[in-house]
Image (cartoon, helix red, strand yellow):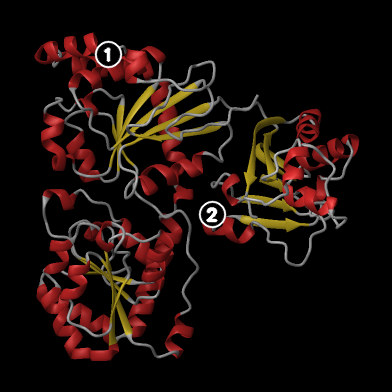
């Protein structure tokens, strides 16, 4: 197991202390460098030759798991000397009570884990060494044990390893970022889950996410000093519901954010009937493009753009090795709801397929009817027909399809909805070494013509540039490598996620002022909805029906949070 998700992704100096490990031990270095390629990552067995200070120090169970309290405290103190004042120390502790470990002991075999230290003992030692425990987590995996062992054991059998994070400075305020997810399949991975996964590694930042329609709860100031509630791509069913929701968050002192990454005119009727309260009754809006920000600012002046980025930098492609294989040139197209954009290119692509024959292959991730309309015997359908008519595959399969292609087509017709889209597909293609041939809509602002990709403005340019890319592999390599360097330098989430947290904290500092402004924005619409508001309040109790509570720790909607004691 590796621990890259527990290391704050902004960290540029990381030390990993492994202890005596076997030859097949996998360090976290490779996977973390994909997230933060600018990091200077040091792996050492112990502190013997370690010099300097680090943003993060990761200490493995093999180094600490058999130490008594005095030796453990002394080791932590010596290690903390190498930790920056605002740095994070991460401890891993193998679970001696793991089912596989206990089974081996009962069968007279060597234990899987060489550890005598318990969770509580490690926590106490961290505190005794002068550090503050920020949180404790665990990683589990399914394990098969005998019924006898399950009955006898008083431990968490599935837990594989415990993870503790600690700091040596005064812990920052406990911050909760809570999201109500309105669209979970397409947008949430890049707009919610990815930034959340980066926030979670930051000291004292906690995450809750739940789907619209599922039960959830709001947390009090005593639990989290700073609370942010993000409403992702959801339209309130009525003005009265939106008003009531705003009033509850206002009374609890929670920062209310709207997240929108598509042009809302697609659902214009729904928004109009609520006077666009989704955007008026929030403290601020976050969106994905300047074009969208300009549109949304008519409802709320507090709009900020957070562009889409890659979670990790894929390995650089070895074009020398690929060229040795002398394979055919592969063109990729893969997009959701871009049927009409692709159909406009079909006659041209069919001519190319006939012209180049087996020297040109196609990989298509789209509706099956588009794939069938492509007149080529050298084509592969990437999609899964069991999901949205073939327009969905796993992200790994999607990346693999791009990575095994030479050219990626990014057509977008010029209309209001398309102009609001982000350049994420260009970034994904650039990160995986496929040269893009794209429409000027959206992509002209991101692509440096002839250096990081190509733009076509009419059919003639499309034909000319596609021919050029098919025939000139050295041009493809030069452009692909330049685009890859651009992604590495500017378009990784590790380089930008702190901008969001800092923005949230700036807004929290202005919360009273922003609440007054939001109240004024929606007050003038209340007379038009007076009857609706009265009917709503007569039917529903704010706390028991609008925001139904469940247990303190685990919510029926699947939203779960671990709060350290």
The structure residue drawn at horizontal position 48% and vertical position 17%, both measured from the top left corner, is 220
- Rate crowding at label 1 as few (under 14), some (14 to 19) or many (20 or more) other CA atoms within 10 Å: few
Of the 4 image quadrants, the one containing the C terminus is top right
Between the residue at mark 2 and the residue at mark 1, the CA separation in whole angstroms equals 49 Å
Q: How many marks?
A: 2
Q: Position of residue 530 (x, y in %)?
A: 13, 11
536 left or right of 53 in image: left
The structure residue drawn at horizontal position 25% and vertical position 22%, both measured from the top left corner, is 281
Q: Position of residue 8 (x, y in %)?
A: 57, 44
Give me the disc on residue 36. 2
Of the 4 image quadrants, the one containing the N terminus is bottom right
312 left or right of 231 in image: right
The foreground one among 137 and 168 is: 137
**Outermost residue to the front:** 147
Q: Mark 2 or 1, which is nearer the eye?
A: 1
Residue 346 image-quadrant placement:
bottom left
- Rate crowding at label 2 as few (under 14), some (14 to 19) or many (20 or more) other CA atoms within 10 Å: many
Q: In this view, does 43 lie above or below 191?
A: below
Q: Position of residue 465 (x, y in %)?
A: 20, 78
Q: Is residue 59 visible?
A: no
Give me the disc on residue 135. none
355 left or right of 150 in image: left
The foreground one among 455 and 418 is: 418
SS at badge 2: loop
Q: Is residue 375 above or below residue 218?
A: below
Q: Mark 1 points at which residue?
A: 540
């Amino acid at each position: 197991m590796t621990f890259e998700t527990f290391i704050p992704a902004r960290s540029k100096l990381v030390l990993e202390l492994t202890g005596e490990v076997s030859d097949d031990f996998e360090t976290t270095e490779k996977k973390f460098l994909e997230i933060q390629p600018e990091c200077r990552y040091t792996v050492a067995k112990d502190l013997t030759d370690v010099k300097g200070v680090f943003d993060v120090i990761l200490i493995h169970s093999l180094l600490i798991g058999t130490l008594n309290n005095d030796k453990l405290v002394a080791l932590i103190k010596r290690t903390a000397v190498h930790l920056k004042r605002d740095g994070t120390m991460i401890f891993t502790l193998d679970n001696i009570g793991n089912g596989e470990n206990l089974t081996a002991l009962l069968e007279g075999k060597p234990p899987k884990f060489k550890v005598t230290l318990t969770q509580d003992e490690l926590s106490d030692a961290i505190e005794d060494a002068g550090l503050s425990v920020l949180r404790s987590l665990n990683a589990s995996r399914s394990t098969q044990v005998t019924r006898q062992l399950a009955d006898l054991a008083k431990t968490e059998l599935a837990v594989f390893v415990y993870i503790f994070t600690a700091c040596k400075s005064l812990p920052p305020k406990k911050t909760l970022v809570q999201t109500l997810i309105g669209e979970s399949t397409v947008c949430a991975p890049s707009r919610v889950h990815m930034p959340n996964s980066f926030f979670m590694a930051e000291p004292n930042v906690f995450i809750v996410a739940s789907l619209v329609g599922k039960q959830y709860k709001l947390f009090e100031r005593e639990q989290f000093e700073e609370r942010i509630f993000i409403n992702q791509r959801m339209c309130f069913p009525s003005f009265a519901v939106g008003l009531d929701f705003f009033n509850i968050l206002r009374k609890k002192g929670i920062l209310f954010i709207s997240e929108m990454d598509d042009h809302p005119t697609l659902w214009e009727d729904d928004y109009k009937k609520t006077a666009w309260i989704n955007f008026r009754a929030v403290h601020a809006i976050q969106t994905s493009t300047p074009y969208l920000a300009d549109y949304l600012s008519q409802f709320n002046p507090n709009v900020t753009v957070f562009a889409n980025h890659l979670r990790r930098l894929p390995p650089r492609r070895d074009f020398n090795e690929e060229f040795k294989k002398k394979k055919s040139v592969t063109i990729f197209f893969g997009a959701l709801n871009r049927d009409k954009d692709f159909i406009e290119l079909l006659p041209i692509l069919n001519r190319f397929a006939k012209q180049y024959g087996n020297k040109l292959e196609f990989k298509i991730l789209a509706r099956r009817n588009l794939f069938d309309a492509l007149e080529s015997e050298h084509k592969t359908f990437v999609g899964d027909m069991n999901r949205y008519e073939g327009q969905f595959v796993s992200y790994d399969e999607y990346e693999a399809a791009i990575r095994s292609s030479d050219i990626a087509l990014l057509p977008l017709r010029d209309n209001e909805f398309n102009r609001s889209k982000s350049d994420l597909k260009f970034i994904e293609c650039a990160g995986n070494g496929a040269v893009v041939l794209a429409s000027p809509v959206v992509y002209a602002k991101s692509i440096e013509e002839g250096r990081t990709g190509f733009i076509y403005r009419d059919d003639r340019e499309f034909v000319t540039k596609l021919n050029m890319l098919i025939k000139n592999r050295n041009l493809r390599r030069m452009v692909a490598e330049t685009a890859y360097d651009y992604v590495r330098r500017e378009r990784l989430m590790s380089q930008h996620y702190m901008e969001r947290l800092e923005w949230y904290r700036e807004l929290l500092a202005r919360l009273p002022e922003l609440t007054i402004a939001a109240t004024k924005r929606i007050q003038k619409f209340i007379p038009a909805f007076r009857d609706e508001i009265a009917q709503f309040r007569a039917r529903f109790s704010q706390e028991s029906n609008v925001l139904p509570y469940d247990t303190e720790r685990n919510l029926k909607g699947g939203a779960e949070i671990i709060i350290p004691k």
